[in-house]
Amino acid sequence: MSPITCLIAEDEPLLAEARAAELASAWPELQLLGVAPNGLAAVEQALALRPTALFPDIRMPGQSGLDAATALAEDWPDDAGPLPLIVVVTAYDEYALKAFDAAAVDYVLKPA
């Protein structure tokens, strides 16, 4: 069985570190592949590393987590297996419907 892997997309280093620690505590088998500082880097890393899950923040410089989720869904290769499960993590509750429209499977409000 393949390991369960993830990427975190978060522009605040302390929040990214905290999210990684929370995930490691709640889900020890989960393998963190990296932390992307913005949406563009998240898409690039996800296409290269093909994680099982992606945990993007909504508001990031360059490209939002929602835009990254949409871009990833559009650019995901047909032969790459299933699209990563996208779990949006944000302090803003008003983006929930947009997140689900952008292929998110869950929406978690900070602090998580």
Image: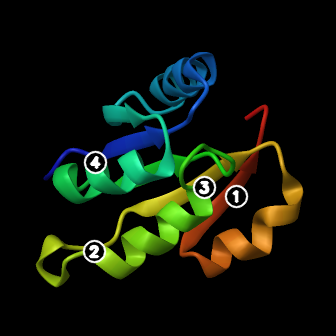
Instruction: Say which residue appears at 54% left-offset and 26% top-offset.
Output: 16
Front tag of 2 and 3: 3
Q: Earlier in the sequence, mark 4 or mark 3?
A: 4
Q: Which residue is mark 3?
A: 64
Q: Nearer the viewer, residue 60 or 87?
A: 60
The image's mark for residue 45 is 4
Q: Which residue is mark 2?
A: 76
Inter-mark Cα distance, 1 to 3: 15 Å
The answer to whether the residue labelled 4 contacts the one labelled 2, judged by CB atoms less than 8 Å apart, is no
The image's mark for residue 8 is none
User: Which quadrant holds residue 97?
Assistant: bottom right
Give the structural element (helix, strand or loop) at label 3. Answer: loop
Instruction: Say which residue appears at 43% left-offset and 71% top-offset.
Output: 71
Indicate the amino acid at tag 4.
Answer: Gln
Q: Residue 56: image x %, image y %?
A: 55, 48
Question: Callout 4: 10 Å neighbours few (<14), some, many (20+)?
Answer: some
Indicate the amino acid at tag 3.
Answer: Ser
Q: Nearer the viewer, residue 62 or 78?
A: 62
